[in-house]
Amino acid sequence: MAFLELYSDKLSQNFNFLNTQFQQANIEWAIVSKLLCGNEMYLKELVGLGIREICDSRVSNLKKIKQLAPEVQTVYIKPPSKRNIRQVVKYADVSFNTEYKTICWLSEEATRQKKLHKIIIMIELGDLREGIMGDDLINFYDSIFRLPNIKISGIGTNLNCLNGVLPSTDKLIQLSLYKQLIEARFQREIPWVTGGTSVVLPLLLKKQLPKGINHFRMGETLFFGNDLLENKTIEGMSSYTMKLFAEIIEIQEKPKVPIGVMAVNPSGEMFEVCQDDYGKTAKRAIIDIGVLDVAQPDFLLPEDKNLKIVGASSDMIVIDLENSEKEYKVGDLISFDLKYMGALRLLNSDYVEKILK
């Protein structure tokens, strides 16, 4: 069985780096835990870092967090579905919202549960995922701020999640101005302007973040230490807090070009023949992980830079060993660094063992 290792020392290093940056800027922040897919061993590690707020997009994960650490504030970071309302109110202290009807349902359920449920109004700033249009904000706020058992604790936005729209100082100033507009119009405080995510962090580090942004939600950069604007590792952070290991189950010298009539494979791919490869062979390894294990080759980065992933089937991945200086043997482990989506899929797989180091 392939396995994934999470390195607690690297995770702690990244947490401490971020915590220092936010404390110096007088900014509150939360960890986004959805990458961990509810793995209790890894969630315990997050809680042990000392964070006071954890965000997730699965209610089942927030339930586990509440069971592990009732004192941690939990945030459901997408607009709730109607079928989820009872669970959201029960296990999430805060939820992101964009629909009046949904907030009415939250109000009714919070009243039944005798709880105060806090909401963040998400505002569209151009990436065209969730968020109300800025021109509708005043009327939207006016319609919901009197609802019982509901407290509007902030406004927020998401960028770079769907269409790749990058954050800018101007966009975040615009978000801050919405807060000022509401406060002036209704004489009510909006505590949070949660405009910060991993892709926004570089603006903070370069001191280009508008002062009005006072809350961040950090996931990808916590686990991968990356500057998403310049595609590099942030100085002082660890680039990979986890690695994948898979065992070699075959090594053979084989032709580079398939033999026989070819058609589309089960993944919907058609092999493209390189004319220069006819008559040539290559030393190839097969490892014991595949698409069924939610291992997508595009998101796997062999630690041995001379290895090349040839392709994947449901249960196996084929790797070209030809340029490697290492003499691999059947039974050896090949290690991979992971892109964010690669780690997310592997952590959601029951076929990949999870280990804490």
Image (spheres, rainbow, N blue to C red):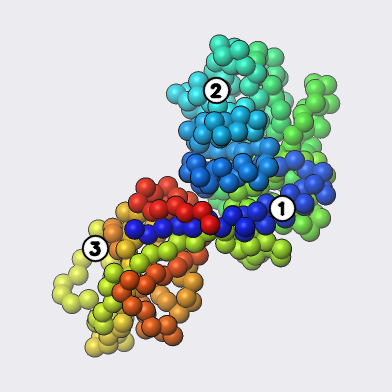
Say whether marks 1 and 2 touch (CB < 8 Å): no
Residue 298 occupies quadrant? bottom left
Task: Check the image and report above or below for 236 versus 294.
Answer: below
Between discs 2 and 3, the one toward the N terminus: 2
For discs 3 and 1, the disc positioned in front in the rendered view:
1
Q: Name the residue under label 1.
A: 16
> Where in the figure is residue 172, as x and y percent of width and height?
74, 45
* Front residue (pair 123, 19): 19
The picture places residue 278, in percent across and down from the top left corner, at 25, 86
Nearer the observer, 135 or 155: 155
Q: Residue at x 37, y 72 (%)?
A: 332
Secondary structure at badge 2 equals helix
Q: Quadrant of the N terminus?
A: bottom left
Q: Residue at x 68, y 37 (%)?
A: 52
Which residue is found at the position 33% from the left and 71% from the top? 331
Residue at 24% over, 88% down: 279
Disc 2 marks a residue whose amino acid type is: Lys
